[in-house]
Amino acid sequence: MSITLSVIKADIGGYVGHSDSHPDVLAEAGECMARAKKEGLLVDYHVTKCGDDLQLIMTHQHGEESEKIHKLAWDTFVDCTEVAKKLKLHGAGQDLLADAFSGNIRGMGPGVAEMEFEERAAETIIIFMADKTSSGAWNMSLYKMFADPFNTIGLVIAENMHGGFAFEVHDIKESKKITFNAPEEIYDMLVFIGAPSRYMVKAVYHRDTGEIAAASSTQKLALIAGRYVGKDDPVCIVRSQGQFPAVGEVLEPFSSPILVEGWMRGSHMGPLMPVSIPDSTPTRFDGPPRVVAAGFQLSDGKLVGPRDMFADKSYDHAREQANLMADMMRRHGPFEPHRLPLDEMEYTTMPQVMQKLKGRFTDL
Ligand code: F6R
Ligand code: MG
Ligand code: MG
């Protein structure tokens, strides 16, 4: 059975500030999704949140980039924005950058990760969702899952994975894409994906079968809007087990927290902390950035789950480490490398301050 899994998300209002989502907004989204399922547009759905981001997880048979499905997501965000406005939630409707839906939700503010595939006898899926960070945050984790034998032993000892994976990488500044074959092209690939604010892993494919293995959302909100509108707060779908990395191999990268861009005012480096879905409440200095993982088995398109994968005790050390890293980074206050370099900051007063002081600069 061919099925499409679409994860479409938007921040349409935070509770309190940018720290969490209001239950009434989630309930409204659930009602919109239930109607669409009843009408037969969706096979199944699950509504959840990561911090202040509303996550619509949908299965259907309309393929990727379906106007019907994108419009359903857009209309759901519009309805939920009404609820957010009534409650005067913070930043109500902030990610709806267009006035009206125009065929495809991509480029209109919300984040989209989609994949179409033939459902396997057992189809294991992990959906990662992050808050207070940008799309490039998945680069290192996807590299570890699909190209690093120190993370994924299956690459070495499982015959059905030994042929490696291909990475589709997007240059979001120049709007170009390229595909790298791992393992033989990893040195070339790392030149690019090691710069995650510009080069982002969009998708990963199994090389022997050509099957889609992972898909992420890569939009950069600031580039779409031409101004700061919050971080992208990306999502990523990963297929697991069999010819794909096992669940434990898919989750393993997050056991060693890394520094990502985002956090306070989208202008800082901070640790990406793996947490349970209820714990995705970025609070300290509006952070630190969070990642949650919802695990599902698909059964004829039905979403059996989720299991809240990072609720597991074995991520306690990662959370402790992330908190220590957060202390270390906060020590720098307004200095780099905590604060982002000038051209990466989402908020800046530089033009105004420069203008005010321009007469006072003299030649060295
Ligand atoms: C970061 C984020 C928050 C806000 C900050 C200021 O992605 O969402 O750190 O940037 O709380 O928010 P505003 O400008 O909405 O008052
Ligand atoms: Mg927000
Ligand atoms: Mg957010």
Image: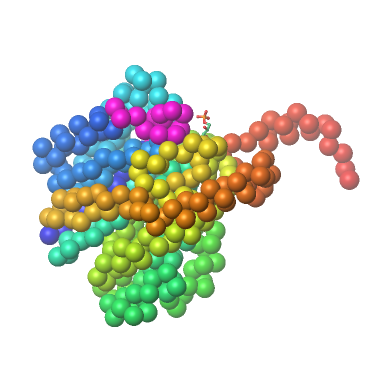
Q: Is residue 12 magenta?
A: yes
**Would you place residue 262 above or below residue 163 in this image?**
above
Residue 181 image position (x, y, % from top left): 41, 73
Image quadrant in which the C terminus is located: top right
Residue 326 image position (x, y, % from top left): 57, 47
The region drawn magenta spans: 11-25
- Residue at far right of view: 364
- Residue at the spot 29% in from the left edge and 47% down from the top edge: 7
Assign the magenta stretch its main secondary structure.
loop
**Would you place residue 90 above or below residue 198 in this image?**
above
Q: Is residue 93 visible?
A: yes
Residue 334 image position (x, y, % from top left): 67, 40
**Left or right: where 351 falls relative to 279:** right
- The residue lying toward the viewer, choosing from 309 and 77, is 309
**Left or right: where 1 falls relative to 195:** left
Q: Quadrant of residue 205?
A: bottom left
Q: Is residue 153 magenta?
A: no
**Would you place residue 123 above or below residue 332 in this image?**
below
- The residue lying toward the viewer, choosing from 254 and 302, is 254
* Tally of marks: 0
Colour mode?
rainbow
Image quadrant in which the N terminus is located: bottom left
- Residue at the spot 39% in from the left edge and 66% down from the top edge: 145
- Residue at the spot 28% in from the left edge and 63% down from the top edge: 240
Residue 361 image position (x, y, % from top left): 83, 37
Q: Is residue 226 visible?
A: no
